[in-house]
Amino acid sequence: MVGKSTNRAPFWPWLVALLTFLADQVSKFFVIRYLGPDAPRHSVPVIGSFLRLSYLENTGVSFGQLRDWSPLITFFTLAVVIGLAVGYRRLLTSSRWANLALGLIIGGAWGNLTDRLRTAFRVGLQRAYVVDFVDVRYYAVFNLADAAITIGGILYGAYLLFFRSRSEEEKPWAQEAGRPSAD
């Protein structure tokens, strides 16, 4: 057996998504516990005045935009997570970097969706929010899910713009069972 061919899509991007999700949720757990609404202080310096951990409830999107659109943002995030899960096999490529990006995006979107759904049950869908806490002065406050989505988006975009070959081989896992490839 020289080369083993498989029709199974790689699973490791799902592991990246799971690890991203867990890192996001664990970090938010500690931020809520030690800097949240019931904590004695809501912000602590990490690197002087440049970087702080600050508890923030964000009902909007990046930079606090669309604050009054929380229900729509929640449903849109849910649609994105479902779309990524359903389209997973079609979005995978032969590039490990692009597949890493896909895992980061799925994990980050899943993390923020979990926040919105959890808080919607507590405060209502109209005020559902994500917990942001990485406070780099002179920039927006964000969380690990936001960072994963941003990094993943940049990596996947760079792949699409600069590295995807026009004649990339068809992925064996994208073929339907019993249907011959286009070769």
Image (spheres, helix red, strand yellow):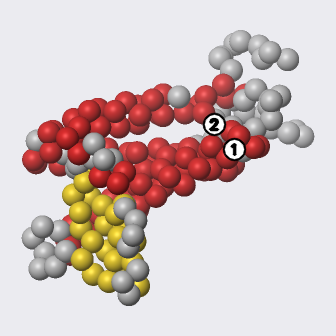
Q: Residue furthest front?
A: 138
Locate residue 174, reporting x and y percent.
66, 25
Three-letter amino acid code at the position of disc 2: Leu
Asked if residue 112 lies left or right of residue 97, the reply is: left
Instruction: Write the residue at 37% across / 62% down.
Output: 140
Q: Quadrant of residue 8?
A: top right
| 62 w.r.t. 177: above or below | below
Residue 111 visible in rendering: no
Locate residue 161, reporting x and y percent.
71, 40
Q: Residues within 10 Å of mark 2 (few under 14, many from 20)?
A: many
Asked if residue 91 lies left or right of residue 133, the reply is: right
State the mark number for residue 148.
none
Q: Which residue was labeled with disc 1?
A: 159
User: In what element is the residue under mark 2?
Assistant: loop
Give 12 or 4, whichever is nearer the viewer: 12
Give 121 or 57, whichever is nearer the viewer: 57
Q: Please give the count of numbered marks on the rendered protein.
A: 2
CA–CA distance between discs 1 and 2? 12 Å
Instruction: Write the residue at 40% across / 65% down.
Output: 139
Q: Residue furthest bottom?
A: 48
The C terminus, quarter of image:
top right
Instruction: Write the residue at 46% across / 58% down.
Output: 147
Q: Earlier in the sequence, mark 1 or mark 2?
A: 2
Three-letter amino acid code at the position of disc 1: Tyr
Asked if residue 160 lies left or right of residue 70, the reply is: right
Locate residue 170, reporting x and y percent.
76, 26
Q: Which residue was labeled with disc 2?
A: 92
Q: Residues within 10 Å of mark 1 (few under 14, many from 20)?
A: some
Please name which of the two marks, 1 or 2, marks the residue nearer to the observer: 1
